[in-house]
Structures are given as structure tokens and as C-alpha cells.
């Protein structure tokens, strides 16, 4: 039988302790014993039992005194006490109750009656402890920095803590009366990104995929990000799980600042270093064939080797740090008529074949809310991604700008590289997911894939999608960007 609770038996007579042990042992209780008052107090502090069976008549410290000391103890004050007494007069029973006993049984006791009383007290104690734990849990959740919502299997909101009410503009008193569906509540206030991860709600998204609720940037405020996780609860009536929402805006902004710093360092270090290394290459070739003084030639060799090593080290650092996502906001809206210039510059930097740029039914002036710096980073990342997944690192790329509606502009980038698996397509927007590790042999966990692109686009209320090209090979990345 499973453990039904802990009972401390206090009696100075061994035969009485043994009798109670034989009576209760078969019911699965954890039984502990004390034969006097001081020992009982020490055992109680150590065990904090679910029930104390306490004999009244004991030498030295009586059961009444033990009961009074237990009730004065801050930890043991709520422990149920069932007193066993041979005294049958009314005054003795009143003293036991006045000392703090919850119930009493007169010796010699009826075995069935004693077991029934013990079961009743234990049941009430479990219920009391449950209420105490619920109050403590409610206090912790109500004061938590994270939002918590309990939802049913039908996605109906059963409970929302004050922080969740703040995030979703719900009244603190009865939030469940305002809106019954969590998905409807989320879509009312935020964009659900990545959209494919929310198609299975409230079931978990694909492995490694993180769900976000995003409030896009406005002229007066940065974008606001909430990360959403589902914590499945033990089975219970009408309860499916708990939704946890965490404000990750600061983390996103920190990553944005890190990426901005990296872009600045890349420009300031690599640009002059490329010129230095290139000129040293030419000089090294000349001195190898023309220079008669071996000492001077050696100096150039050392300088040339040092510049090459420095260039490689900086390139490795930049390659690592550029994988940090960015929300590159701020600045004037970008005119999509200039996208060809960005594409040409990025292709030249990446040493790619010429990239074709097409405009489908677009007005002369078409601006998106993202600034030029953000668009340049997006184009560079998409083209580099196409190169990374091409077997010869020389993809044929087509960039298309389309105006599908009056509120947005679509940027499509198609290549003829590898065809991706369903798992890769589902997770390319996931931070630190490295789909190319099986192709290039790189170590998993160092890359961010297209996460930088998705954070930029979602941050302004846009959308991202990726699909295998039809007919294959290659993929098509499609970004929907709000128009300015």
C-alpha cells in the first residue's frame, strides 16, 4: 500500500506503542515513536508529521504540556493532535481541547473507531495542506514577473495572473470573463510568429522552434516581444495546460545592439585590412622574383604572412559574431527601387555570379518601413544563405519585388541550391539551429540560419516563409514587408 502519511506515536508504555503499531502498520502509514515529552518534541520538529497520537498521562512532561508546546511552535502549530486518555470525566476532556488537541479517544479504545478517526483527521489535514499550498502558489504566481494563463483543452482561459492581464489588457478581477480563447486574445494584441509554429496550438511546436508574440515597432516605440511556452499540467477536470509568457524585448534589443556593433567593427577592420593584404600579395609576388636582397624579401614575407593570418582571425571572429540576430530599426523608410543596388553590392562582396532583379507590377516609388541598413543586412544574409547551401558555392539567384496588396511589398529570393527537408524548412527561423551542419561539417549550435532576417521582419509586423523551389532544386524565401 502506498504511504498514507506520517504518524508520531507518543506513549510512555511500550505495550501501548506496540499495540498502536500493529493496528496502524497495515494501513501504510510511516510510524515513528517517542516515549516521553522532550523526545516527542524533538521528533516532531524533525519529522513535522501529519498526525500525532499523544498520551495524556506521562511522567515528567504530561501530554497536555506537550500539546501546549506544539501549539506554540511556529512550524508545528497546525499539526493535528489526537489525544489518548484514560480519563473519562468532562473536565479532563475540556483540558485536552483547551490545550489544543483536535480530538481525543478514551482508553481502552475501540480499534475500528480509532482507525476511522485517524483516517478522518488525515483526510482533513491533507485538504488543509492543499489549501495552504494553493494560497502560497497563488501568491507566487500573482507576484511573478512572467505571465501565466491556465487554459482548457478547448483553449478556454480558466485563469490569468496579474502579469498576463497586463500583457493582454485584461481586467485583473475576472479576466476569464472577457475573452474565452487564448488564440483569439493573442491575435487581438500581437502578431503570432513564426506563423507556422502556431498552426498546432496548443500542441507543442516542432522541436527547437520558439513561439513569439510580437507587437511591431511604431514611430514612438520599439517592437515588443513575448516568448510563449506551454507547460502541461497533471490531468485534471477541464484543464489542458498552463501558458507562460515572458518579456524578451530586452534580450532582442541587446542582440540587436551586438549585431550593430559587429557590423561597425566589420567595416572598420576588414575594409582597410583587405587593401593592406591585397597590396602585400602583389609586393610579395614581385620580391619573390625580382628582389635580390634576401633580408628585405624575408621582411615582406613575414609582413605578408602576418596580414594573411590577421585577416583570417578577424574573418573568423566576424563570422561568429555576425550570427547574432538584429532588430535594425530606426532611420528613413527604404525605397524598394534601390533594392537592385543592395543586391549588386552584396553579390560582389560575397563573390557571387550576377543576380537578376525583377519588379512585378510595382509603382515607381515603393517604400517599406525598414530602413536601408536593415534591408542591406537582410539582402546580404539571404544571398549568403543561398551560397552556403549551394554545392559549388556559386548559386544562380533571382530576386523579385512584388506588390500583392496596398499595405505590403513582397521580396522573393530564389536559388538553385539544395532542397531542404521538412525539418529544416520548419526550423530555419529558429535561433542556433544550423541546418547546414550535415552539408558543410560545421559544428551545430554556432549558427543562427535566417533568424536575423525573421527578427527584423517580425519586429515591424511583417511575415517570413520558406519553401522548396518548384521544380527543384533550391528554395524560395519570401518576406512580406509593411509599406511605409
Image (spheres, helix red, strand yellow):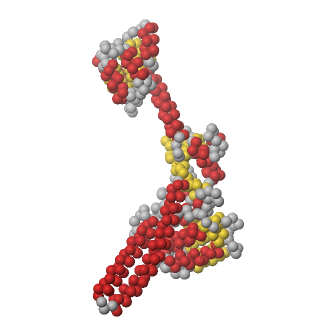
Say how many tags the image has.
0
Q: Residue at 42% x, 26% y: name it.
A: 74
Query: Where's the C terminus, which quadrant?
Result: bottom right
Residue 33, placed above or below residue 363: above
* Quadrant (top left/top right/bottom left/bottom right) for the N terminus: top left
Residue found 37% across the figure and 11% down from its top: 86
Judge whether residue 118 can be spotted in this image.
Answer: no
Front position in the image: 378 or 445: 378
Q: Quadrant of residue 302?
A: bottom left
In the image, residue 320 lies at what x, y percent? 43, 66
Taking the spot 52% from the left edge, 43% from the top edge, the residue there is 144
Q: Quadrant of residue 40?
A: top left
Q: Is residue 180 above or below residue 109?
A: below
Residue 115 is drawn in which quadrant?
A: top left
Q: Is residue 32 left or right of residue 189?
A: left
The one of 7 and 449 positioned closer to us in this rendering: 449
Kindly tell me whether residue 306 is visible in this rendering.
Answer: yes
Above or below for 444 versus 66: below
Instruction: List x then y, in percent, for residue 34.
Output: 31, 22
In this view, the residue in front, 344 or 21, is 344
Q: Is 77 positioned to the left or the right of 400 in the image?
A: left
Residue that appears at 40% across and 65% down: 443
Q: Position of residue 181 (x, y in %)?
A: 62, 47
Image location of residue 244, percent across then percent down: 53, 47
- 183 versus 121 height, above or below: below
Amino acid at each position: 500500500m502506498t504511504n498514507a502519511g506520517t504518524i508520531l506515536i507518543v506513549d510512555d508504555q511500550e505495550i501501548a506503542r506496540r499495540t498502536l503499531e500493529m493496528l496502524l502498520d497495515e494501513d501504510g502509514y510511516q510510524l515513528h515513536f517517542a516515549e516521553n515529552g522532550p523526545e516527542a518534541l524533538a521528533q516532531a520538529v524533525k519529522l513535522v508529521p501529519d498526525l500525532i497520537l499523544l498520551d495524556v498521562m506521562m511522567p515528567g512532561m504530561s501530554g497536555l504540556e506537550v500539546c501546549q508546546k506544539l501549539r506554540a511552535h511556529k512550524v508545528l502549530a497546525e499539526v493535528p493532535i489526537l489525544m489518548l486518555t484514560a480519563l473519562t470525566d468532562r473536565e479532563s476532556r475540556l483540558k485536552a481541547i483547551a490545550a489544543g488537541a483536535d480530538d481525543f479517544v478514551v482508553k481502552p479504545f475501540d480499534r475500528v473507531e480509532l482507525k476511522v478517526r485517524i483516517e478522518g483527521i488525515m483526510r482533513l489535514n491533507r485538504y488543509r495542506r492543499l489549501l495552504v499550498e494553493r494560497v502560497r502558489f497563488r501568491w507566487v504566481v500573482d507576484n511573478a514577473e512572467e505571465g501565466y494563463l491556465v487554459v482548457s483543452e478547448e483553449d478556454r482561459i480558466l485563469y490569468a495572473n496579474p502579469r498576463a492581464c497586463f500583457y493582454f489588457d485584461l481586467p485583473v478581477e475576472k479576466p476569464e470573463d472577457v475573452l474565452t480563447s487564448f488564440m483569439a486574445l493573442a491575435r487581438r494584441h500581437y502578431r503570432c510568429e513564426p506563423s507556422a509554429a502556431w498552426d498546432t496550438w496548443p500542441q507543442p511546436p516542432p522541436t527547437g522552434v520558439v513561439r513569439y508574440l510580437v507587437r511591431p515597432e511604431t514611430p514612438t516605440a520599439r517592437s515588443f516581444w513575448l516568448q510563449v511556452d506551454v507547460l502541461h499540467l497533471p490531468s485534471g477536470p477541464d484543464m489542458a495546460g498552463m501558458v507562460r509568457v515572458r518579456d524578451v524585448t530586452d534580450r532582442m534589443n541587446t542582440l540587436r545592439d551586438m549585431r550593430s556593433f559587429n557590423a561597425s567593427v566589420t567595416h572598420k577592420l576588414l575594409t582597410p585590412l583587405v587593401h593592406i593584404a591585397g597590396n602585400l600579395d602583389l609586393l610579395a609576388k614581385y620580391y619573390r622574383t625580382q628582389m635580390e636582397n634576401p633580408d628585405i624579401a624575408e621582411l615582406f614575407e613575414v609582413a605578408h604572412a602576418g596580414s594573411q593570418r590577421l585577416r583570417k582571425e578577424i574573418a573568423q571572429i566576424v563570422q561568429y559574431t555576425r550570427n547574432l540576430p538584429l532588430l535594425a530599426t530606426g532611420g528613413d523608410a527604404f525605397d524598394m527601387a534601390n533594392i537592385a543596388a543592395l543586391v549588386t553590392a552584396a553579390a560582389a562582396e560575397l563573390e557571387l555570379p550576377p543576380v537578376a532583379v525583377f519588379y512585378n507590377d510595382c509603382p515607381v516609388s515603393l517604400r517599406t518601413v525598414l530602413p536601408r541598413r536593415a534591408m542591406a543586412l537582410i539582402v546580404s544574409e539571404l544571398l549568403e544563405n543561398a551560397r552556403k547551401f549551394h554545392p559549388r558555392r556559386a548559386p544562380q539567384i533571382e530576386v523579385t519585388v512584388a506588390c500583392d496588396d496596398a499595405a505590403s511589398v513582397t521580396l522573393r529570393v530564389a536559388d538553385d541550391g539544395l532542397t531542404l527537408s521538412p525539418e529544416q524548412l520548419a526550423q530555419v527561423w529558429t535561433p542556433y539551429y544550423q541546418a547546414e551542419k550535415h552539408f558543410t561539417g560545421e559544428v551545430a549550435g554556432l549558427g543562427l540560419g535566417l533568424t536575423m532576417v525573421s527578427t527584423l521582419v517580425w519586429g515591424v509586423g511583417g511575415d517570413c516563409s520558406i519553401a522548396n523551389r518548384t521544380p527543384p532544386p533550391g528554395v524560395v524565401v519570401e518576406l512580406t514587408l509593411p509599406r511605409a
